[in-house]
Image (cartoon, rainbow, N blue to C red):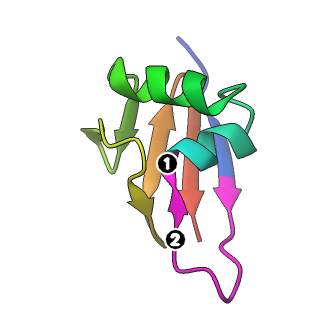
Amino acid sequence: MTKITNHIFKLKEEQDYIQLNNLLQVFQLAQTGGHAKLIIQNKEVKVNGVIETQIRKKLKKTDVILVANHSITIE
């Protein structure tokens, strides 16, 4: 059984969202923007339990992202 590592990403006060591709790079789940694009296009990312294929999907507070064995909650 694979253990899920939980993370929290806090948006700055002036920030309404973070793009999915950027979030993957922040948590070093993707080394580059191109790598993030491949991970997303290969349907390896779920947002709120649904496979997400939008590379620049705007993630807002309460969104939960699941990729590999990482869960990221946006606050």
Question: Dot 2 surroundings within 10 Å: few (below 14), some, or many (20 or more)?
Answer: some
Q: What residue do we see at 61% from left, 39% from top?
A: 24
Q: Is residue 69 visible?
A: no
Find residue 73 and report its horizontal and vertical position in percent: 55, 57
Q: What residue do we see at 53% from left, 42% from top?
A: 21
Q: In which quarter of the image is the C terminus?
A: bottom right
Image quarter for residue 14?
bottom right
Q: How many numbered marks appear?
A: 2
Badge 2 element: loop
Task: Residue 20: give its label.
Answer: 1
Give the CA distance from mark 2 to mark 1.
Answer: 9 Å
Find residue 72 and report its horizontal and vertical position in percent: 58, 48
Q: Is residue 68 above or below residue 64?
A: above
Task: Residue 42: give its label.
Answer: none
Q: Disc 2 marks which residue?
A: 17
Quick check: is 11 in the magenta stretch?
A: yes
Q: Is residue 40 visible?
A: yes
Find residue 26 and report its horizontal and vertical position in percent: 73, 45
User: Horizontally, is 75 left or right of 27 in the view?
Assistant: left
Q: Main secondary structure of the magenta part?
A: loop
Amino acid under disc 1: Leu
User: Which region of the structure is painted magenta?
Assistant: 8-20
Badge 1 element: helix
Q: Which of 38 and 2 is in front in this view?
A: 38
